[in-house]
Each structure stands twice: as C-alpha cells, then as structure tokens.
Image (spheres, helix red, strand yellow):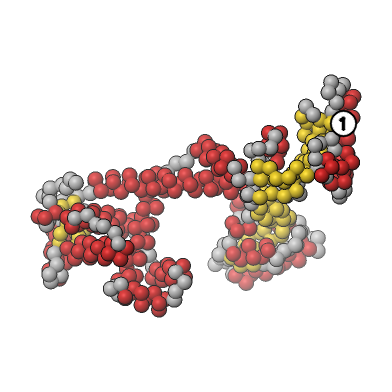
Amino acid sequence: MKYRLLKAGILSTSVVFSMLANAAMQSLDKVSVIVDQGVLLESEIVELVDGVKQGAVTQGQALPSDRALRTQAIERLILKSLQLQMAERMGIQISDPQLEQTINNIAERDNITIDQMRQRIESEGLTYEVYREKVREELITGEVTRANVRRRIYITPQEIETLVAMINQQGAEQEEYRLGHILIAVPSGADEEQISKSRGTAEKVVELLNTGSDFTKIAIASSSGPKALEGGDMGWMNVNSMPTLFSEAVQGKKKEILIGPLRSGAGFHVLKILDTRGVEIVEVEEVNARHILVKPSIILSDQKAEKMLVDFRTKIIEGEEEFADLAKVHSEDPGSALKGGVLGWNDPSVYVPEFKEALSKLSKDEFSQPIRTVHGWHLIQLIERRIDDATEKRKQDRAYQLLFNRKFNEETDTWLREMRESAYIELLDKKDL
C-alpha cells in the first residue's frame, strides 16, 4: 500500500489548527491519518478494529494479524471520510425525518419495535444517538456513491436483448404446457383443392371453439391426431420437448388460449392450452385518460381554479362544450393540452396518488369531480381500461436491473479506487507506515 508524503502547503492553516484543536479535545486520543481536508482519529480506528474482533468472536471466525486488521480498518475509514467530504461539497444531507423513517423501516424489517431496537443497540455497547449518526453516515455515503456511479453506467439495447434471451432459455427449461390438439389432416400428395378444403375445416373448428363448443367433443369427432380418442389431450409437455411448431406458438401464452390453424406437412393443427405450470405471465391494468389541469396562482385563487373546473364539467356533460376544446385552450399541462388532454395508455402507478385514486373510481367515459394534486386542479375523464400482457417488459426490466447491479458494483469499485488514488493521504502514526 502506497501513501503520499506530506506536501507543504496542501492544508490551510485554519484546517491544521482545526485538526490540532480537535485532537487536543480528545484526551488520550490523537490524529492518526490526514485524509484530504479531514482527519482520522486513533479512537475511530480502534473502535472499528474492536468491532470487527467482537463480531468475529461471536461468529467464530478467524482473523488476520492485528497489523493487517488495522491496515484494512484504516482503508475503510479513509474511503468513508472521502465520501463524506464529497457529500458535503455536493450538498447531500439526510434530514432527521428521513433518518427516523429509515430506522423505522429497519425495525419493521426485523419485526421489532423502536424500544426493542434501542435495547438491542445498547446491549451491543452503543448509544441510540451514536447508532442514529452511523445510519445517517451510511445513507449519505450511499447517496454520494449512487450520484457519482450512476452516470458512469451505460447499458446497450443489445445487452438487454442478449440477457432476455438467456432468461427465456432458462425459463423454458421450467415451462410445461398441457395441450389439447386437433389435427385436420391433409392427404399425402394432396392438390390445392384438397388443401383448401382441409384449411376451411380447420377454420370452421376454430370458429366453433371460439363460440363455446366443447374441445373434447370436437377432437373426438374431427381430429386425425394420435390423441383424438382422449379428446385431443396430449398431456404435460416441456416446451423444449414438444414439436418446434407447437413450442414457438404456445411459449408465453396463458391458459385457455386457442392457437391455430398451424400448417405442417401432416395438415392443419388447432391447439388449446388446457393448463400451464412454471410459466411466468405478468399482466397489468392500463388506463387511457384525459385531463384538464388548472394551476392556482396569484391571479387565480385555489377556490376559483376549482370552480372553473366544476363549470367545465357541467358544460361538457350538458353538451355545451367539448372536453378536447377546453383542454386545448385552458389546460396547463403542455404535454397533453395539444392532444385535447389525452394522456395515452399508462400504468396508473405512474400518476401521483390523488390522480391515481380518482382514476380507480371512474367507469369508462365518466368524469371526475375536480381533484387537487401537487400540480394543481384536475378534471379527469377515463377513456378506457385494458389488461396488458407485460411479461416481456417485465423480463426486459429484470434484465436491465441485473445488468445495472452488476455494472454498478464494478463501477463503484473503480470510482472508489480512483477517488482514493487522487486523494491526499498521510499516515502520522509510525506503526502504520
């Protein structure tokens, strides 16, 4: 491990005096390391070393020599000091309410009350106040790390596509489908008229099934497949073990879906997914809505903004005005105003809580009463709802997150190393040299 020698003029006189004053206030303590514009006290190093030793005893772990342990502790504290100094330059702070919320979350995660947490902390030799500040430091270092590392990460669409393909391949090993199968055979050497006739029969079968006819009965009566007498039930098959024509058609589909007709050398196949297992299907509700946003101002009071939308609602319902026309003239949401207030299809969770809640109570084409959000007053109309298959998007999101986490860890190590190498570090205790 290399440390730079002290360079004259690096530290200002005020900083040196501050260090000396800080050290003087610690009877039996001293400055052991200078870290850029900060210092590490001997007590900090000893506290960390003792904590590691205590943890090792509790868990029955072996430890290296005291010198190696001390060196590692100093390195850990140097990095923390550099991160906290950078956070201060960036203006990153954690307020007391944020801190208390985090501690409450920790207690909830551990299924204990705050009082029980206090007792546990004190039993480990810490005061609650010291614990709070340690949590605050962890939150600050986490924020400064994310702020600096996130902008170093770039993920290409090709990387996501490749990882999604791997996820699909791994998932396919677990996917099993119970298929119903009807084969409308085409005789060997059939001419176009015969092929056309078989195709018409298959299409008629699909039409009957879509209007509620029983699959089993039609399979027994019409199928030329090997499982006709079993009502076309092919049993459970892994997606990788079924015919390629079938696997490509059924993969990612859900129970009760009809597929076909599919053309093969044998004829025309109609499939029904009777059941699935090991298949991940993600569905989300999406809403298409439109709104008119009016923002209160010095000129337009909160009450007048609300009343304006009440009047708009009445005029729209009575047919005196068109929603789109009012949105184009009066809405203060530039993204939707020119579209007549239309927001397009979205997952409701993208909206602020009040807007989302109002949407959840609306039926198709219904208008809300004016609602207040952080953005102002809204008049909302629900245009339509739909259930969307988000399976592929969920896989892409998962792939992105996996890639991000991997690159984040790699870039964090690089960023910390670069920050450490560019910092001014001086060891003042001879035993650390």
Looking at the image, is 426 positioned above or below residue 48? above
Looking at the image, is 28 positioned above or below residue 35? below
Q: Residue at x 32, y 63 (%)?
A: 59
Q: Which residue is mark 1?
A: 198
**As rendered, which of 102 and 65 lies closer to the eye?**
65
Tell me if I can see residue 104 in this picture: no
Among the 4 quarters of the image, the one containing residue 329: bottom right
- Tag 1: residue type? Ser
Circle 1 Cα neighbour tier, 10 Å, few/some/many (<14 / 14–19 / ≥20):
some
**As rendered, which of 42 and 355 lies closer to the eye?**
42
Horizontally, residue 264 falls left or right of residue 107, namely: right
> Total of numbered circles in the picture?
1
Q: Where's residue 397, x and y in %?
A: 55, 48
**As rendered, which of 251 and 397 lies closer to the eye?**
251
Among the 4 quarters of the image, the one containing residue 126: bottom left
Q: Residue at x 42, y 44 (%)?
A: 407
Horizontally, residue 211 falls left or right of residue 244, namely: right
Horizontally, residue 111 falls left or right of residue 230, namely: left
Looking at the image, is 223 positioned above or below residue 4? above
Q: Where's residue 185, x and y in %?
A: 84, 31
Tell me if I can see residue 130 in this picture: yes
Q: Where's residue 186, x and y in %?
A: 84, 28
Q: Where's residue 191, x and y in %?
A: 87, 21
Horizontally, residue 2 falls left or right of residue 215, namely: left
Q: Residue at x 32, y 70 (%)?
A: 131
Looking at the image, is 125 positioned above or below residue 426? below
